[in-house]
Every structure is written in structure tokens, then in C-alpha cells.
Amino acid sequence: MLTSTNPGAFVARAIPKTPRLDLVVVANMVEPGSRVLDVGCGDGELLQLLAETRDVDARGIEISRDGVNECVAKGLAVIQGDADTDLADYPDSTFDYVILSQTIQATRRPRWVLEQMLRIGKRVIVSFPNFGHWRIRGQLLWYGRMPITQNLPVSWYDTPNIHFCTIRDFVDLTRALDVKIERGVAFGPSGGRVRFDAPWWFWNLFGEQAVFLLSRKN
Amino acid sequence: MSIVRLDRGDKASRAEIIRREADEPRSQVVVLGKDKPLKLDAGVELSPYQVAYQTYGELNADRSNAILICHALTGDQHVHNVHPVTGKEGWWDSIVGPGLPIDTDRFFVICSNVLGGCLGTTGPASKNPATGEPYGLTFPVVTVRDMVRAQAALLDHLGIGQLLCVAGGSMGGMQVLQWVVTYPERIFSALPIATAARHSAQNIAFHEVGRQAVMADPDWRNGKYLVEGTSPHRGLAVARMAAHITYLSDAALHRKFGRRLQDRELPTFGFDADFQVENYLRYQGSSFVERFDANSYLYITRAMDYFDLAGEHGDVLANAFRNLKSRVCMVSFTSDWLFPTEEARQIVHALNAAGAPVSFAEIETDKGHDAFLLDEPELFAIVRGFLDSAAKKRGVKAPK
């Protein structure tokens, strides 16, 4: 079960100087010159990184008006829209990559969103905070309260995150959707990568964030 | 402001001004179509025809920094200069100028009066060369596509192959979209603002009210008022008043006027302009007729009514945008009920379905449809960012 994927296939390349490691990891998974849609692109940080370092045709969709306007003012091709509904409007295989960066836990229908992404993109990249990380488990276990961490600093009543999952949960979903995990990366709070040959339970316990590159099997 | 009356001024002199501005405008003009007539959608040919236009800034060496601005229904080519008839500043002075988002230090900005207009481009008030009298209702009905064809002919005359950008709001936005569909290879980018891919039934209905108001004025004389030396300015003023309400929002009207009375403490129990909002509308109506031709109003509203991009492409809007390479940035305003965000979203969906590079921003404002003409910092930031990135991508160099 655990050897069915090969997370180690990812080899770190020259990483440009940027503040957020997860964005760099995502960017490094994208082939230069490809066509990319970033779902929930926020203020366009990842899109700009992709445009500058990977020379991609970068598009974005973002629900917050402020985010969109900031992106457009930066010259990015971003539209205002809701991932939970608007992905249905895109034709099949429009993009080389469809990216969901730190957003899947905020969607109302994560499974549907992922299905749509796999339909409109040849490949899909998903990055998310791992709710199975030992710190989060520890907070629940010892304090009996919804965890608040540096990575997830908002209280349960204010957070937009309504569908947290663990790395194992996510892998289960990819199986249910019958998609191929081409690469996977998990890394801890300090940015250190979880050993790629470690088993899933180890990833799930020590990876604070995870990034997966998926593709359709057929 | 004192109470405004709609039937002020001298009719004969007004007819005189309209005729003069139509034939000999205080603007740059070019006569086109002598050898190559303009083929109109109505199935007739127009030859020759005059185009009046203004330019700002300088064209650079490789002619890559030209931006065409398309004006709205009652706008004109005087984007960034004092208006020759009204003496007021240009209608887009807030956004076009040195250092402004549409930067005339970097870009060569062109705006022409639309076909069917009344400030120098051939329209119903222009002299028909065949008769020596104003066309009036013998002028063929024109479409937004015809307007764009005339603009393309102007660009040919100016020696500009591909525009860096074509931009405009409202009916100007319709022309922008028409450019995207009819001449996609001639535009590097497009900026349609507060517009739609077709005129809605409600909007056609409003236009019909306006046209009926004009035609109900006895001074309209079946469209021959210029020849007969009269002026249907009361009808036109009413049309403008009704239309002006649609350009604003309930919130904006309330903020500006509320229920405040005009120059009085108590209602008069009569039909004078008791309320400030009434007087404001009368002012809008009466100042509009000083600079606008009533028949032009009929023709241009009609052109907007006929506008339906999907209709040209089997009712599938995405087909209109097939293989589009130009970048498009669509902008709408939350309180615009004339061209609501939903209409903009349909265009964005179609552009996405066609795989075109599109941005879409909705700007929150309570100023209604007219927001595109007003001081909207978010709009300015978006226009600046979009044009900067287009200029960068195209490698536009500043003019020497």
C-alpha cells in the first residue's frame, strides 16, 4: 500500500529566494512554459512566482474581491469566482496544471472540486496543512480543544477552513477518485523535508504541510 | 442652483450649433471611404464619411504604444481636453493624462466620435453630400460593429496596425468587445468596463422610452427639425432625464439629494421642481441638449439595442472568442444595475471557455453605472496594472 506511490521522485531543484517554502515546492513541480490555473490564488503570490521563474501562462480564480483586484493590478490574469461552483464552466483539459494551494480545506465540496480540477487540468497540484501532524494531535489529546498553531492561527469560529484532512485522508481520497500520485512532498515547521522513503504514517505524523502532484490514470 | 427650465434657449441658434459641430467640428477630422465605402450591417454603403478624433501623447518609433478609447452613448472624442461646446474638462480626465493610469507620457491615445454621432463623425446631423441638407432620418441605421469598422478605417489612415489596448465603458465597452470579436489580430489587449455582450430587454425598454420622448416632441418634425430650424430639446431632455436615473443607483441618489427641497423650506403644492433631485435631473436634461443632436440619440441608442455578440455566432458567446490571443480585462461595478456584474460574468465565462487570457474584477461602489467615469481608486489601480503588464509583455518603448 505504501509503496504504490513514489514520493521520492521529487528532487529539489534550484529554489529561488522567496519567503514561502510551500509555494516554492509547488512551483518546482510545474514544467516551464506550461499553462496553469491557480484555484484560490489569493493576492497572486504563487502566480507571480510561476510567471517569473517558470515562464508559465498563469491564470487564477479567487473568491475575494480584494484579492482579485490586487492580482489584476499586478497584471495577472485572474477572475473573481467561487471554486465550489465556477470550475464547472471550464472545458476539459484546458490547463497543463491546476493548482489548489492551501485552499482545499476551505472549499465546501473538496471531492467535487478535486474531480473538476482533474477534468480541466492534465495534472493537479494540491498543497494543504496536515491535520494529522503530531502537534495538532497533541493539542487535541492534551487540551481537548481545536488546535491553534503557527500554520493555522485562527480559532475554530473564525476560520474559513471547514474541511481539514490528514495526509492519509487525502491519499484515501485520491484512491477513491482513482488518480495517480506522481509526486508527494511533506515538510515540517522549519521547512525540513520528511524523509521521502518514510512510510505514510511517518509522513502523517511529522509532515506539517503536504504537496501532491496528481494525474488521471486513463 | 436655481430652478432649471427645460425649454430655455433659442431654438434656431441651437439648430445652428448642432449643424456646425456635425460638419465642421473643432477637432481633427479625416474624410474616409471615397475609394473604399464603409459597408454597413444595414446592407448599404456609406461613402464618403467623415471621422472626427482627438489624440494625446506621441506614437513611438515602432507604433506599438497606441491605445484606442471608445466613448459611451452620450460621450464624444474629447477625452482629455476642454470640450469645445460645453467648455468643461474632458470626460475621462480622471484616468487619461500625464502620469495617470492611461499615461499620455507613455502611450499614444486616440478617441474618435462614433459613427452616427454629432460631433464631427458622420451622423444624422451631418450634411448629406448628395442633397446638401442634413441626413436626418435618411441616414442609415448603424450598429456597434459599423462604429468599430469606422474606427478601424481611422487606424488604417493613422498607420497603426495593432493597438496596445482598446478601452471603454458602457457602449464604449460594447465597442471594445466588438473589436475583440471582429479584429482580434489588431488588438494586443482589451479593457471593457461596465458593459455586456448584448443589450438586455430592460435596457432596450429604457431606450424606447427615451426615443418616444424625442419623437413625441412636436419640434422633432419627423426628424427634419434641423432643416426646419426647430429643436426637439424638451423631448431630448426628458429622454436624458430618464436615462440618467439608470446611470446612478438608489443609494447614490439618496446620498446626493435625499428628500431635500430646492431653494425652499416647504413644498409648494404644485409641479415646480420642489425636490433637489428633480432640479438635478432637469439640469442634466437641459445641459445635455446644448451639445447633443436628438436624431443622433435615436440612432446610437438603436445601435446599442441591436448589439448582441452571441447572436453573430450561433448564440454561443464562447464561439465569438475562439482562438483569441489578446488579453482581456473585464471590470464591473457592484451597484451598476444597467450593466450588472452577472452580464460581465457571462462574458468572462465565455472567454474562459475559449481559453482566452482574461481577468475580471468587480469593484465595490454605490455610484452605479456612472462609476466608470468617476474617481474610483480601485479602477485606476486595475487599469494601471493591466496596461503596465500589457506594455511590458509587448516590449513597448516610450516615445522619444
Image (cartoon, rainbow, N blue to C red):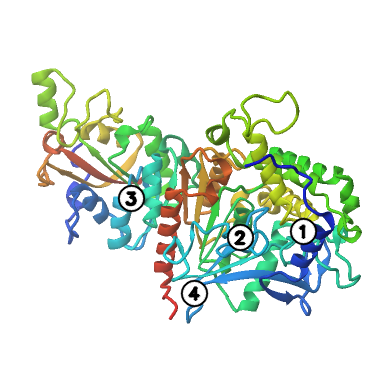
**Are both tags, 1 and 2, on one chain?**
yes
**Residue A44 circle label:** 3
Q: Give the CA distance from mark 3 to mark 4.
A: 28 Å
Number of other residues with Cα within 10 Å of mark 3, as a class: few under 14, some 14 to 19, many 20 or more: many
Is residue B199 at all visible to an observer of this figure? no
Any mark on residue A9, and which? Answer: none
Q: CA distance from mark 1 to mark 2?
A: 16 Å
Question: Measured along the vertical axis of the image, is residue A56 above or below residue A119?
Answer: below
Q: For this view, does A130 lie left or right of residue B289?
A: left
Total labels: the figure holds 4
Disc 4 crowd, CA 10 A, few/some/many (<14, 14-19, 20+):
many
Per the model, the C-alpha gap separating discs 1 and 4 is: 30 Å
Q: Position of residue B265 (x, y in %)?
A: 61, 26
Question: Which residue is denoted by mark 4 in the rendering?
Answer: B64
Where does the image place residue B147, in percent across and percent down from the top left? 70, 62
Q: Secondary structure at mark 1?
A: loop
| First of labels 1, 2 by sequence position | 2
User: Which residue type carries mark 1?
Assistant: Val
Observer able to see residue A132: yes
Asked if B368 appears above or below B294 in the picture, the reply is: above
What amino acid type is highlighted by mark number 2? Cys
